[in-house]
Amino acid sequence: MDSISQQKEKREILKRYKALLWTWSENKGVKKNNQVRKAFIMACQAHDTMRRRTGEPYIYHPLEVARIVAGEIGLGETAIISALLHDVVEDNPDYTIEIIRTNFGDKVAYIVDGLTKIKDGYERLESNAQVESIKKMLFTLSDDVRVILIKLADRLHNMRTLDSMPPSKQQNIAAETLYLYSPLAHRLGLYVIKSELEDLAMKYNEPEIYRTISAKLKETEIERSIFVRDLILPIKQAMKSKGIQCEIDTRDKSVYSIYKKMQSKEIPFEEVYDLFAVRIIIDGPVDDEKMICWQAYTIITEQYNPLQSRLRDWIVTPKANGYESLHTTIMSPMGRWVEIQIRTRRMHEIAERGYAAHWKYKQQVDRDKIQEGGLDEWLGSLRAVLNSKDSSSLNVLDDIKLTLFSDEVFVWTPRGHLKSLPIGSTALDFAYLVHTELGTHCIGVKLNYNLVPLNHKLRSGDQVEIIASKKSLPKEEWLEYVITPRAKMSIIESLKEQRKVQAAEGRLKLEEFFNANQINFSKGNINRCSEYFKFRSPVDLFYKISINDITSDHIKEFGTFYASENMHSKSNKENELRSDSKSHPSPKKSKLVVDYNLDDLDFSVANCCHPLPGDDIIAFSPEGTHYIVHRTNCNEALGLMTRFSKQVIHAKWENKPKNTFLGGIKISGFDRKNMISDIIRVISDDMRFNIRSFHIDTTGELYEAYISLFVHNTLDIKDTVDKLTHIDGISSASRMIQFTKT
Ligand code: MN
């Protein structure tokens, strides 16, 4: 590189550093800071010769991450310094955690160390290491949530610059982002970052659909802004006349959430009515904020009719991640439902920037007793799951996903405290949430003063009282009663404890039985006996003996087998050895994008998402032989790509597929004479596809039809849908994303 472009680059680096300081000072009113400057210089030196894949100097990356941390998340000095240094130790062997500690103190060293230990999924080798690392990352949450916030900023910047990655990696990174990082951002209340992560992931996972939806959003932009302007004008005037200071803005729904809605409701883009929401952000004293919000609600509903069933009060009971707001849906003069979100400036900041803002206000306005139990409790339950050494690592991931994704129910304790649990939680889950001891010794539950079974599912608003007795202990079937990881883990632990006690008794009994049958009470023989009865471990055998499931008669039976087996043991052992060396076939390596003629491969399409030629797909091969093809947007597929990235290949359809695939179409409209025969005529005569099933529901004059048919690819479905929409009496036709086998 010549010296002129070198100079240019240096100027650009300084410019970006100044932008960082500016972002920070804008938020916190800080002008100069020697420690931040020192961190910037150290990062520059450490990454001196490194470049990003884009060819840009590497230092751009930590600078951008620090800027996201300061601006979009709203964190302060320690986090900014840590963000600047987050890749230093990993990338340059001359820099150690100790050097960072000497220069910046324990806190920064701790955070940078945490960040260095988290490997990104796509860099990991096996699924187990991958899960371990995710576990590690989540575990640091409980110590210093800044580690995870900076990690999210790191991922956000990497997603923003994902273009420079090879396509095969892009999909893996995008899948992992959807599977783990966006739910995390959601749980921490970082809505803006969550939406951006989802949109970016979708851009790479389903480029075609992403482009279509964003183009449609763009097309309708002007129309929307005129609509909003007319809608909010009377609200603005009314607020002003009542002396309420507020800012009104609109936020478009993200491409990803529009797509989710289209899928879940099986509707085309045009029928998604809530493409945007209007936000009323009120400036006023924190002491009166609840009252002001309801006052604003009254003013709005004097102008427009609200849909009562859609009133959501997150002010009296905030969401577990801290979100507070009042949502109402009103009918606009143009006949469209519009969602309006009412909140104060403080609530707005928490909604946008989550944890950090939450924290800030908590310190400032403690007298106002702002609810913040949710986040702490969530961190607590995560800690419980991660602390338990026994759980298999993949289950842990699923449990965490359950905690991250599920919606919540709110119930009351007898003393009038509100607790939130994932939807589907039972009375027993509640007992464990209140206290592990209360769960362990639970013998009964009173729900709204009536006795109910322990596995009774809770509903929001229930008042729950737990009855406990010191003598009572968890039972095996309790595992079926609970859904929260915290409860499950505690039950497993107690069962193990109980088993240990019982196993000791069982072991003594077994020794007696062995002696009676002249079997040597050796480790080998105990193992053989436990294998004979097909137990996973001798502990299970001891346990079953202690509860008399295995009796002295059974052991006699084993004694006979033992005697005969002893004679053949030599030849058997050789056989075992031989079969052992064969039992681990090496899994096929994952490749970059491969052009497969799926005809030649042993493959089947997944039942969950029914991919068609033309869809973006992956192929998953659990054993390295048979492939199961999923759509890349399928939930199942996202999980597979994250957890078993080595067994997943990014497949492509061959240009001229020979197979015919099962596709589905949903039609609705007004019933008339010959409707059904007209539909069938189009599909089988005009398009020449075989119909596999035809199901029709009618309510009055309206009907809905579900058709499954054999086609070659997505284009066939699209053409058929186009043709069908031209039939008189069909008001909408679209591809069915999910359909049960008929
Ligand atoms: Mn990084």
Image (spheres, rainbow, N blue to C red):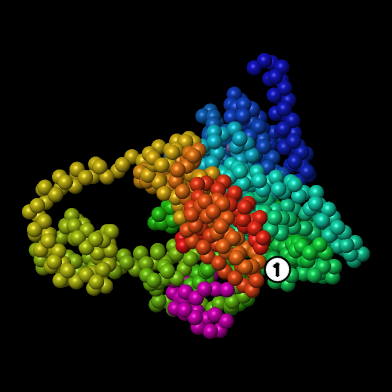
Instruction: State the residue at coordinates (19%, 60%).
Output: 532
Relative height, residue 208 to residue 3 (above, below): below
Instruction: State the residue at coordinates (59%, 76%).
Output: 462
Relative height, residue 657 to residue 607 (above, below): above
Magenta highlight on residue 448? yes
Q: Nearer the viewer, residue 485 or 91?
A: 485
Q: Quadrant of residue 86?
A: top right
**Would you say residue 704 is visible in this rendering?**
yes
Q: Residue 712's spot in the image, x, y percent?
A: 50, 47
Residue highlighted by disc 1: 310
Instruction: State the residue at coordinates (17%, 69%).
Output: 554
Magenta highlight on residue 59? no
Q: Which residue is outermost to the right?
A: 241
**Would you say residue 191 is visible in this rendering?**
no
Instruction: State the residue at coordinates (41%, 42%).
Output: 599
Q: Nearer the viewer, residue 583 or 96?
A: 583
Secondary structure of the residue carrying tag 1 is helix
Local packing at callout 1 (Cα closer than 10 Å; few below 14, some 14-19, many 20+) is few
Q: Which residue is outermost to the bottom?
A: 450
Q: Quadrant of residue 267?
A: bottom right
The three-letter amino acid code for the residue at tag 1 is: Arg
Q: Residue 589's spot in the image, x, y percent?
A: 40, 37
Q: Residue 361's spot in the image, x, y percent?
A: 72, 57
State left or right for residue 426 relative to residue 108. left
State left or right for residue 223 relative to residue 674. right
Q: Which residues are magenta?
A: 434-459
> Quick one: quadrant of the N terminus?
top right
Looking at the rendering, the quadrant in which ligand 1 lies is top right
